[in-house]
Amino acid sequence: MNETNETSDKTTVVTAPEIVCGGCASSIKKSLGSVTGVADVEVDVATKKVTVKHNEGVARETIVDALDRAGYSAAS
């Protein structure tokens, strides 16, 4: 994940219905892991949930946009 001087004190959880396998999880981790300020990404294939630990500077919209660029939409 990206190096950051800020602490990763926030957690955002989004649901991505298109997650069906470990390959999906890898793609999502790679995409979200490249976002500045993201410290950790966990993907639960069974529940289709993506948990992102990040600093205050990362908005939910930024996470959703990165997920979209990886080819997965976030359910509202």
Image: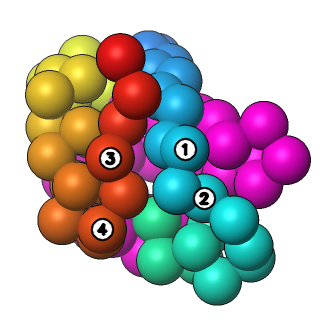
Residue at image location 24% in from the left, 23% down from the top: 60
Tell me if label 4 and label 2 are in contact, CB under 8 Å: no
Residue at image location 46% in from the left, 65% down from the top: 28
- Residue 45 vertical placement versus 27 (above, below): above
Disc 4 residue type? Gly
Disc 2 residue type? Ile
- Residue 70 vertical placement versus 55 (above, below): below
- Residue 63 vertical placement versus 61 (above, below): below
Mark positioned earlier in the residue sequence (4 or 2): 2
Tell me if label 3 and label 4 are in contact, CB under 8 Å: no
The N terminus is located in which quarter? bottom left
Magenta stretch containing residue 41, yes or no?
Answer: yes
- Measured in 3D between alpha carbons, the distance from the residue under mark 4 to the one under mark 1, in whole angstroms, is 11 Å
Camera-nearest residue between 28 and 56 = 28
Mark positioned earlier in the residue sequence (3 or 2): 2
Disc 3 residue type? Ser
How is the rendered protein coloured?
rainbow
Q: Which mark is residue 17?
A: 1
Tell me if label 1 and label 3 are in contact, CB under 8 Å: yes
The residue at which mark 3 appears reads as 73
Tell me if label 2 and label 1 are in contact, CB under 8 Å: yes
Crowdedness near tag 3: few (<14), some (14–19) or many (≥20) residues, C-alpha within 10 Å? some
- Measured in 3D between alpha carbons, the distance from the residue under mark 1 to the one under mark 3, in whole angstroms, is 7 Å
Q: Which residues are magenta?
A: 29-54
The residue at which mark 4 appears reads as 71
Mark positioned earlier in the residue sequence (1 or 3): 1
Q: Is residue 74 visible?
A: yes
Q: Position of residue 22 (x, y in %)?
A: 74, 76
Q: Which mark is residue 19?
A: 2
- Measured in 3D between alpha carbons, the distance from the residue under mark 2 to the one under mark 1, in whole angstroms, is 6 Å
